[in-house]
């Protein structure tokens, strides 16, 4: 998958088995092994393929980021409490990663631009309440930057 994500831009028609095998140079993989893996990935829906003459052209069905996000969602479904897993995850992220989460939650709630992050001119840190204020407060609480029940100054 790394070869497909790294070699095939979103607008590309994809790559052939030979091109993938060549990109894996140094791993001493047989052409048929690469072909079998790509065929299985197509069967699982991870890659898309189109016939080109006698060969197939392969490209990723989703971006690397979309795939990783799906893996994270699948992991949350493995059992136990999703909330507990999310809290544990939120407590493990760095300050920068928490800012990214805060901005994403703010944009989902309708905040845009600098107001979606702490210290900006929008709901968080601005003295005003906004549509994403509760979510960003919760991210702060989960990340351990503010005790539960204590809201940011608005």
Image: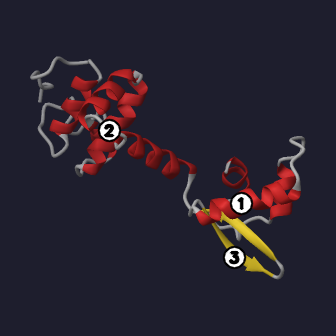
Quadrant location, the C terminus: top left
Percent x, y of residue 29:
86, 48
Q: Residue at x 76, y 64 (%)?
A: 15
Above or below, comparing residue 12 to residue 90 in the picture: below
Q: Are marks 1 and 2 in contact (CB under 8 Å)?
A: no
Please name which of the two marks, 1 or 3, marks the residue nearer to the observer: 1
How busy is the neighbourhood of tag 2: few (under 14 within 10 Å), some, or many (20 plus)? Answer: few
Give the image quarter of residue 33: bottom right
Q: Residue at x 24, y 34 (%)?
A: 83
- Marks 1 and 3, Cα distance to the nearest angstrom? 12 Å
Q: Earlier in the sequence, mark 1 or mark 3?
A: 1
Badge number at residue 79: 2
Q: Earlier in the sequence, mark 2 or mark 3?
A: 3
Give the image quarter of residue 46: bottom right
Residue 8 in view: yes
Name the residue beneath numbered marker 3.
50
How busy is the neighbourhood of tag 3: few (under 14 within 10 Å), some, or many (20 plus)? Answer: some
Of 68 and 41, which appears nearest the observer?
Answer: 41
Q: Secondary structure at mark 1?
A: helix
Of 88 and 146, which appears nearest the observer?
Answer: 88
Name the residue beneath numbered marker 1.
38
Left or right, 92 with respect to 141, comes to: right
Q: Earlier in the sequence, mark 1 or mark 2?
A: 1
Q: Secondary structure at mark 3?
A: strand
Q: Secondary structure at mark 2?
A: loop
Give the image quarter of residue 117: top left
């Amino acid at each position: 998958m790394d070869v497909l994500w790294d070699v095939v831009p979103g607008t590309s028609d994809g790559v052939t088995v030979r091109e993938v095998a060549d990109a894996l140079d140094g791993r001493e993989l047989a052409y048929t092994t690469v072909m079998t893996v790509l065929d299985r990935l197509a069967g699982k829906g991870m890659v898309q393929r189109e016939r080109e003459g006698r060969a197939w052209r392969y490209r990723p069905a989703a971006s690397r980021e979309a795939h990783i996000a799906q893996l994270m969602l699948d992991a949350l479904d493995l059992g136990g409490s999703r909330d507990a897993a999310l809290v544990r995850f939120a407590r493990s992220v760095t300050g920068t990663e928490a800012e990214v989460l805060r901005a994403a939650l703010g944009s989902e709630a309708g905040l845009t631009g600098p107001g979606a992050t702490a210290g900006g001119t929008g709901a968080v840190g601005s003295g005003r309440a906004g549509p994403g204020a509760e979510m960003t407060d919760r991210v702060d609480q989960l990340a351990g930057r503010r005790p539960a029940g204590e809201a940011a100054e608005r």
